[in-house]
């Protein structure tokens, strides 16, 4: 039986039930509020390992909020309260024994606007490696090259590794940020609208990169771009008003959605 065929529709129209041994993340009954105002309501889904899962939905639906929960970026906001469980490879990410720094190494994050550090291209990629320590210069050089190759950037920068990261184009900066995350060998990469600030050619390169990376790790993508979700993702979750409306293999959700609200959104009849 294939992974796709193990999905079964739930009563709500979400397709969320598949072999738990294939799961990277298991999200169980998660709710979240900002200052008492609900932002997520009883979200449950499993994210399959080594696949691209897209979160789609209208602005303010909770997709970025859910994404940021997955590596505990909300921890420093005292107005945030949440309930439910999030398991990464079977381990509760909010368990007392979980080190947040190690969690964020395992679960990397790429934001909408590229955020290279004010240092050289090389030092951007080596930044996390230096924090970990224990590497020879030769080994660090090898990892930096590997990360830049994995991010499809090596050929463009190999002759100017000591140049400022800010000298790169926007698309190159975003791939550099991805290389910086890859250097510390994450298991998951979270991408929050990673191409929305880029030109079409740079966007295409990011999409090609996303597709190529799933052989190495699990990717979760937030996007407003329906065509992008259809092009790069294997599974898609549609959120609305803080709730999971439908979750299915991408081909199924875009060609034969279970619910009218999903169809209205993906066809542009709902903003």
Image (cartoon, rainbow, N blue to C red):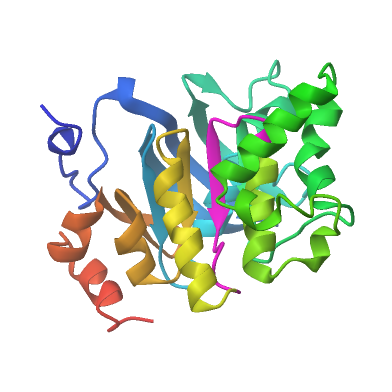
Expressed as whole percent of the image width and height from the top left, the position of residue 268 reads: 30, 82
Q: Quadrant of residue 72?
A: top right
Of 187 and 48, the residue lying toward us: 187
Q: Is residue 47 above or below residue 120?
A: above
Residue drawn at 50 percent across, 60 percent down: 206
Q: Quadrant of residue 145?
A: top right
Of 200 and 188, the residue lying toward us: 200
Q: Is residue 90 above or below residue 155?
A: above
Residue 135 placement, left or right of 107: right
Residue drawn at 30 percent across, 48 percent down: 234
Expressed as whole percent of the image width and height from the top left, the position of residue 189 reads: 55, 42
Q: Quadrant of residue 149?
A: top right
Expressed as whole percent of the image width and height from the top left, the position of residue 185 reads: 62, 29
Residue 183 visible to an observer of this rendering:
yes
Q: Is residue 115 above or below residue 180?
A: below
Q: Is residue 109 above or below residue 205?
A: above
Q: Chief secondary structure of the magenta span?
A: loop
**Bounds of the magenta segment:** 183-197
Residue 182 visible to an observer of this rendering:
no
């Amino acid at each position: 039986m294939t992974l796709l065929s193990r999905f079964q529709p739930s009563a709500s129209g979400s397709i969320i039930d598949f072999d738990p041994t294939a799961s990277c993340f298991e999200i169980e009954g998660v709710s979240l509020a900002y200052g008492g105002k609900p932002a997520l309501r009883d979200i449950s889904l499993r994210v399959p390992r080594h696949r691209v899962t897209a979160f789609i939905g209208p602005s303010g639906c909770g997709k970025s909020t859910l994404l940021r929960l997955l590596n505990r970026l909300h921890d420093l906001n005292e107005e945030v309260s949440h309930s439910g469980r999030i398991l990464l490879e079977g381990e509760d990410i909010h368990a007392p024994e979980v080190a947040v720094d190690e969690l964020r190494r395992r679960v990397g994050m790429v934001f909408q606007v590229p955020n290279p550090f004010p240092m050289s291209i090389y030092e951007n990629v080596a930044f996390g490696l230096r924090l970990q320590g224990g590497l020879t210069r030769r080994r660090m050089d090898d990892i930096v090259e590997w990360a830049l190759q994995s991010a499809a950037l090596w050929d463009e920068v190999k002759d100017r590794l000591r140049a400022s990261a800010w000298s790169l184009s926007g698309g190159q900066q975003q791939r550099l940020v991805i290389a910086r995350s890859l250097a510390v060998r994450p298991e998951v990469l979270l991408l929050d609208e990673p191409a929305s600030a880029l030109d079409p050619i740079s966007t295409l390169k990011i999409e090609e990169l996303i597709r190529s990376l799933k052989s190495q790790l699990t990717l979760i993508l937030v996007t407003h771009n329906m065509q992008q979700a259809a092009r790069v993702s294997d599974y898609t979750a549609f959120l609305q008003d803080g709730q999971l409306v439908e979750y299915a293999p991408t081909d199924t959700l875009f060609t034969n959605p279970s619910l009218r609200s999903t169809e209205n959104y993906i066809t542009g009849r709902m903003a």
